[in-house]
Amino acid sequence: MQNTGLKVLLHASTWFAPFLVPFILFLLVDDEEIKKLSIQAVLFQLVIAVLITISIFLIIFLIGIPLLIIFGIMAFVVPVIGIVKAITGSTFNYPIVGSWIK
């Protein structure tokens, strides 16, 4: 369970500084796992923002409403899962973008 506090901070930062904290941790911390999670966190926030924006535009066609609900829930639940995994010492990869970063 190395860097548990940093992992929790990284996952929790999605609610107060979703781009700033991962960027700072990427620059300051030498741990490869923290660097990987930082990149995944930023990519996840960007992808969710794009998906929510597209869903807002699709509301005109009524398909955007369920998508907006699903992506909104994902934006809240995924960091909570990451925090729980960090506290228990388990490995966590963000959905959608986790496989993009090796």
Image (cartoon, rainbow, N blue to C red):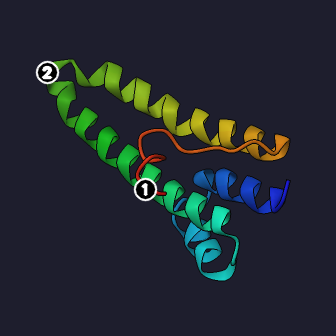
Up/down of 13 relative to 64, above or below? below
The crowd level at tag 2 (other Cα within 10 Å; few <14, some 14-19, many 20+) is few
Image point (22%, 19%), residue name: 63
Q: Is residue 78 left or right of residue 50?
A: right
Compare marks 1 and 2 and give the one earlier in the sequence: 1
Residue marked by disc 2: 61
The foreground one among 45 and 39 is: 39
Say which quarter of the image contains residue 51: top left
Q: Residue lying farthest front?
A: 102
Image point (46%, 33%), residue name: 72
Q: Is residue 9 left or right of residue 16?
A: right
State the mark number for residue 14: none
Q: Residue lying farthest bottom?
A: 28
Residue 64, image x and y in percent?
Answer: 25, 25
Residue 77, image x and y in percent?
Answer: 60, 33
Up/down of 57 relative to 34, above or below? above
Label 1 sits on what residue type? Leu
Residue marked by disc 1: 43
The crowd level at tag 1 (other Cα within 10 Å; few <14, some 14-19, many 20+) is some
Q: Is residue 37 left or right of residue 75?
A: right
- Label 1 to label 2, Cα distance in Å? 27 Å
Label 2 sits on what residue type? Phe
Identify the secondary structure beneath mark 1. helix
